[in-house]
Image: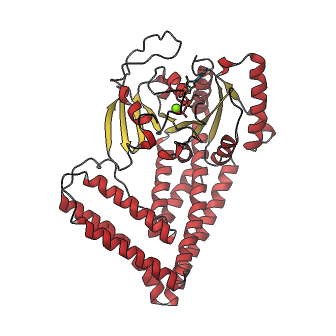
Amino acid sequence: MNILETTIKAQELFSGFELCRLQEQETQVLADRLRSRKITIAVIGQFKRGKTTLINSILGSKLLPVGIVPITAAITRIEYAPDAAPGTPDAAPNGEAAAVDGETATATVFFTNGLSEQVPVSDLHEYISEQENHDNERGVAEVELLTDAEFLKGGLTLVDTPGVGSVHEQNSKSAMDFARESDGVIFMLSVDSPLNQIEVDFLRKVRRFAGKFYFAVNKIDRVDEDELEEYLEYCRSLIVGIMELDDEEAKALKLLPISARKGTGVSELTELIREDLLTRGTEIMERSVGLKLLEILNNTRSQISSYREVLKMAPNVFNRRFKEMSLLLHDQREKIDSLEEGTYLRARLNEEKALLTRKVRELFGIEYYYYVDREDAAELMDRDEFAAELTAVYDELESTINSIFMYKEENAYAVARRIEDLNILIHDMRKLTRQIERELAAK
Ligand SMILES: Nc1nc2c(ncn2[C@@H]2O[C@H](COP(=O)(O)OP(=O)(O)OP(=O)(O)O)[C@@H](O)[C@H]2O)c(=O)[nH]1
Ligand SMILES: [Mg+2]
């Protein structure tokens, strides 16, 4: 069996369980990614290391805002589109990439409530930068930028992320969340600061999901050659330890000295990535999907175990929480009638789903999944339609909770049978976990 087949197998297993809809969806996304062969590489690192400057340098134009204070507050995905030519940059006197007109590249801002908006690239800073979108008050979930940069041709998505450890990191999807969605990571260090604990902790966690790491050491224009050598040696030994590299892997570890601002070393980095994608793109992708599948299986096992605990929950505790959930659903239903026509009701529906997801997690420790429709979020919906959809959402949750309730009420036999089913699911997931571990080890 290969990774794709194992992923499909996991998806089939999840599809048989109402409780595993989220996992079914996640494994579907993984399988689609493997089939599409589109690779995502995220630039990650502490704030102010020069991540955004590097991306601008790779794209050959100053599309994204950079600065001396923490800037990037939202995930920005950059993809190739042949028609989105961002104009010809003029030469800039200070050696930095020049600003471009920006009106011809296409940028779309996706908001957390599911709405989205096309904005001129020259206005992107209003959504991406921490100063202008303080504490993400605009509710930006993600930004998508389409440009015709040569490097992205062939299906590579490059992603700019907020600095790890910045006070603003938690505002939207964090770099860590995004690392889960990437196949490769360019990890940015810079010579003006030693590797610190936040970076060490981050690397330890993120090495569990990324199929490939590139370590870039930025701002080399600030030091002389000897200082650079010393810094590289220092980083190398730390990284070998953090990533638990064996002798062979340690020998192959490359640290890429660059100056994102001046452009030094950037083409060596892009060449290396291009070469890897050409010669071992599939392997990188499979490794990354395999690692993520492993993560999903492990998390789900613990989650299903907690669902099993709900079934075993003492009747008085369960009844209290069941009542609280029923009351919440009842109150929410009451509010439907007072909603005004003309607001973005579909976005409102998404907000309601998020609230219920949070509540179910809080009360029962179960991850309840709703599909949030971004595509349609901006479509106007009339009030009756909205009321019907929202009622359906409430009904569905109520019936799930009721079915747990019934299992608990019915008789000891039904509960035991249900627990038995879950044991089988856990057993099958263990088997798949071992399978995927074998496949990864063979790579
Ligand atoms: N000297 C020097 N400065 C650089 C270099 N690359 C970036 N900088 C500067 O470092 C500062 C931070 O750059 P950004 O690209 O905004 O850094 P970032 O990692 O994206 O920061 P956050 O988005 O806040 O996480 C800016 O003032 C840049 O001009 C470089 O190669 N050399
Ligand atoms: Mg940045």
Residue farthest toward the right in the current orientation of the protein: 247
Q: Position of residue 387 (x, y in %)?
A: 23, 64
Label tally? 0
Q: Position of residue 46 (x, y in %)?
A: 61, 36
Q: Position of residue 326 (x, y in %)?
A: 37, 76
Residue nearest the observer in this picture, 414 or 223: 223
Colour style of the rendered protein structure: secondary structure
x 55%, y 67%: residue:
303
109 over 299 or under it: above or below: above
22 over 285 or under it: above or below: below
Decide if residue 225 is on the left or right side of residue 302. Answer: right
Q: Quadrant of the N terminus?
A: bottom right
State whether residue 245 appears in this view.
no
Residue nearest the observer in this picture, 12 or 371: 371
Q: Position of residue 10 (x, y in %)?
A: 53, 60
Residue nearest the observer in this picture, 270 or 92: 92
State whether residue 177 appears in this view.
yes
Choose top left, top right, bottom left or bottom right for residue 252: top right
314 over 70 or under it: above or below: below
Decide if residue 381 is on the left or right side of residue 201. Answer: left
x 34%, y 71%: residue:
329
Q: Quadrant of ligand 1?
A: top right
Q: Quadrant of the C terminus?
A: top right
441 over 370 or under it: above or below: above
x 43%, y 43%: residue:
136
